[in-house]
Image: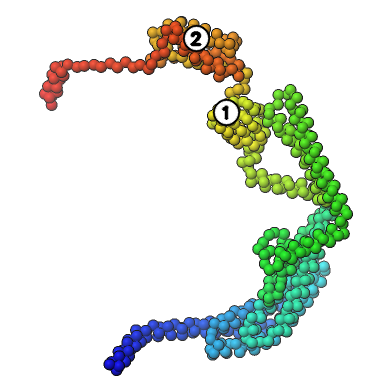
């Protein structure tokens, strides 16, 4: 029995092996294929690296006597190729890291890379020194050049500076490669960190100088706005400032790659950019910015504490004085417009009152701004630009404002007028330069934009002091027309609210399907219109009842005709006969 069980287990194991064998072979073949592809990628990179390395040696071995300009171009080309080769070295190292450590291809290529990268620290640092000398020499030649030559020299300086900072970044990126290859780099790292830190400090200082120079030129330009040399100098300083800021960003990124704390430099970058970005939340950037502002404020207060206190008290005094004078101006303007007999609308009065108080408060604010040391000229110019932008963005609101101004000038209605505007009707309760508030007769409040009102028909029902009331009464066809006319005139004449002039008119308006329609048109004062209308309708109905004048219901005569059956049969027979 145990032998049978053992035999059965062997059978099962053999079956599983036969089933899994194709998958295991396929996985092994796949791994072998991936490994071969990675080895081929390393070989391709090595071949390209050797070609580029040989090309660089040609620059060093072949020396042909050329002009200074040609020599500078060749050197720039050589340094650019060397920088590209250094970048490909890092890519090759990353590809090598994907191969097993005991792989023959990896061991061979790593050995060659160690030989090629031996003394890389001396080559990079020496290359940076040569770049610095060439930049200084090019700068020294600029004053002696003119025209196109001068522009070419400046372009060369800019290109060399860009190459220098790219080399510094490549220097910071090479350390992981050196660590993977087992090449000692501690001394090189200390030198690189020192070079990058000195460069960053130099750029921070240059940014401070250019910022101070920009402020000085701006102050001079405010005093002498017609000086074109100041405008040119300002443009050059701004361009230099932008270039230095871009260089500081590159150096800061390089130091960050080396693991150096760069929060101080990032704080400078955020401040110099003048815009909020995600960089402010990196590391201790925000903390450094706040600390710097705190120190500057503390130093300023320590040096100018008495002046600051006096100026603060003076500004507070100006503010409260302007506020008090603004209230007095509003009260005086309100009293003046209320006593005025010029027929100003309520909207006009409100605008005059608000404008008087706002003008006084605005003058006070301008005085406060001048006390803070802010030049009013550039600020007003800036407000003009901002006003243009805001006006473009708020076209609809400004359209309402303009429509409010037209309503203010032409006064088509006033507060407490009954109007039909923008498809709505009601009493005007409030008016402003932006909107008009109307209360309907069922006590709903409607706020209508002035642009909707001015762009549509405005019907002011209460604009005239005397209004005509149009009433229509229907009587039956058998009524006496003269009697009806007399009754209507007597009822209208007996009401105290009906005016004798203009004369009340009674006319036959139309002949309806079941009635004669009379029109009664009396006149009344604006405030009595509704009372007169309701009273006359009631009085006419009661008088019609007394006089026996009927107000008919709608009537219709229906005529029904009958035909004799005998008359239809011959027609039917004749019709069949024709068929």
- Residue 135 position by quadrant: bottom right
Q: Quadrant of the C terminus?
A: top left
User: Picture coordinates of residue 108 (x, y %)?
Assistant: 57, 90
Q: Which residue is mark 1?
A: 426
Q: Residue at x 70, y 45 (%)?
A: 387
Q: Residue 455, image x and y in percent?
A: 59, 33
Q: Looking at this view, is 325 or 242 the one in front?
A: 325
- Label 2 crowd (10 A; few <14 / some 14-19 / many >=20): many
Distance Cα–Cα, label 1 vs label 2: 31 Å
Which residue is pictured at 63% across the width and 35% down the height?
Answer: 435
Residue at the outermost front position: 1
Could you tell me which residue is drawn at 67 percent across and 46 percent down? 390
Is 44 situated above or below 343?
A: below
Give the residue displayed 74% in from the left and 81% down from the top: 191
Quarter of the image where the N terminus is located: bottom left
Could you say where residue 459 lies in the image, as x and y percent from the top left? 58, 26
Q: Is residue 73 something that shows in the picture?
A: no
Give residue 164's quadrant in the image: bottom right
Is 492 situated left or right of 16 in this image? Answer: right
Instruction: Report helix, strand or loop for mark 2.
Output: helix
Placement of 153 over or under 467, stated as above or below: below
The dot on residue 488 is: 2
Q: Nearer the viewer, residue 7 or 79?
A: 7
Above or below, 504 relative to 427:
above
- Give the class, few, some or many, for how many residues have Cα within 10 Å of label 1's Cα (few <14, many ≥20): many
Q: Residue lying farthest bottom?
A: 3
């Amino acid at each position: 029995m145990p032998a049978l069980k053992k035999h059965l287990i062997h059978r099962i194991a053999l079956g599983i092996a036969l089933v899994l064998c194709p998958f295991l072979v396929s996985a092994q073949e796949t791994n072998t294929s991936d490994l071969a592809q990675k080895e081929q990628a390393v070989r391709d990179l090595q071949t390209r690296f050797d070609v580029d390395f040989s090309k660089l040696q040609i620059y060093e071995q072949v020396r042909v006597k050329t002009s200074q300009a040609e020599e500078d171009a060749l050197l720039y080309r050589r340094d650019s190729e060397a920088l590209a080769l250094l970048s490909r070295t890092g890519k090759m190292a990353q590809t090598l890291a994907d191969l097993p450590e005991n792989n023959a291809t990896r061991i061979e290529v790593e050995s060659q890379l160690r030989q090629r990268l031996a003394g890389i620290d001396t080559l990079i640092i020496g290359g940076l020194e040569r770049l610095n000398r060439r930049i200084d020499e090019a700068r020294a030649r600029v004053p002696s050049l003119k025209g196109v030559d001068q522009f070419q020299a400046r372009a060369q300086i800019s290109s060399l500076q860009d190459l220098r900072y790219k080399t510094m970044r490549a220097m910071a990126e090479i350390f992981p490669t050196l660590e993977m290859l087992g090449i000692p780099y501690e001394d090189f790292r200390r030198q690189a960190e020192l070079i990058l830190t000195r460069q960053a400090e130099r750029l921070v200082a240059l940014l401070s100088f250019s910022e101070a120079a920009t402020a000085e030129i701006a102050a001079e330009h405010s005093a002498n706005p017609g000086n074109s040399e100041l405008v040119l100098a300002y443009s050059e300083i701004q361009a230099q400032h932008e270039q230095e800021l871009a260089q500081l960003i590159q150096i800061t990124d390089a130091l960050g790659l080396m693991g150096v704390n760069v929060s101080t430099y990032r704080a400078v970058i955020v401040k110099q950019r003048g815009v909020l970005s995600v960089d402010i939340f990196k590391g201790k950037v925000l903390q450094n910015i706040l600390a710097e502002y705190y120190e500057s404020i503390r130093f300023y207060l320590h040096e100018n504490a008495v002046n600051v206190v006096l100026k603060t008290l003076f500004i507070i005094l100006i503010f409260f004085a302007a506020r008090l004078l603004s209230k007095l101006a509003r009260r005086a303007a309100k009293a003046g417009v209320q006593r005025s007999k010029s027929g100003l609308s309520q909207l006009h009065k409100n605008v005059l009152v608000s404008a008087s108080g706002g003008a006084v408060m605005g003058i006070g604010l301008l005085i406060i701004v001048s006390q803070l040391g802010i030049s009013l000229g550039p600020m007003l110019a800036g407000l003009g630009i901002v006003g243009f932008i805001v006006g473009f963005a708020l076209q609809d609101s400004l359209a309402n404002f303009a429509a409010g101004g037209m309503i203010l000038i032409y006064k088509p209605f006033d507060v407490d007028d009954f109007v039909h505007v923008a498809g709505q009707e009601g009493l005007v309760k409030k008016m402003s330069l932006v909107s008009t508030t109307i209360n309907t007769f069922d006590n709903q409040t409607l706020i209508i934009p002035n642009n909707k009102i001015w762009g549509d028909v405005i019907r002011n029902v209460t604009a005239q002091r005397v209004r005509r009331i149009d009433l229509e009464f229907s009587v039956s066809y058998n009524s006496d027309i003269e009697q009806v006319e007399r009754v209507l005139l007597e009822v209208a004449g007996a009401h105290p609210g009906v005016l004798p002039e203009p004369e009340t008119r009674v006319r036959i308006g139309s002949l309806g399907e079941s009635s004669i329609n009379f029109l009664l048109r009396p006149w009344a004062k604006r405030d009595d219109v509704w009372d007169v209308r309701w009273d006359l309708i009631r009085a006419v109905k009661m008088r019609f009842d007394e006089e026996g004048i009927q107000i008919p219901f709608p009537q219709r005569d229906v005529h029904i005709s009958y035909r004799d059956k005998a008359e239809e049969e011959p027609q039917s027979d004749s019709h069949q006969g024709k068929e």
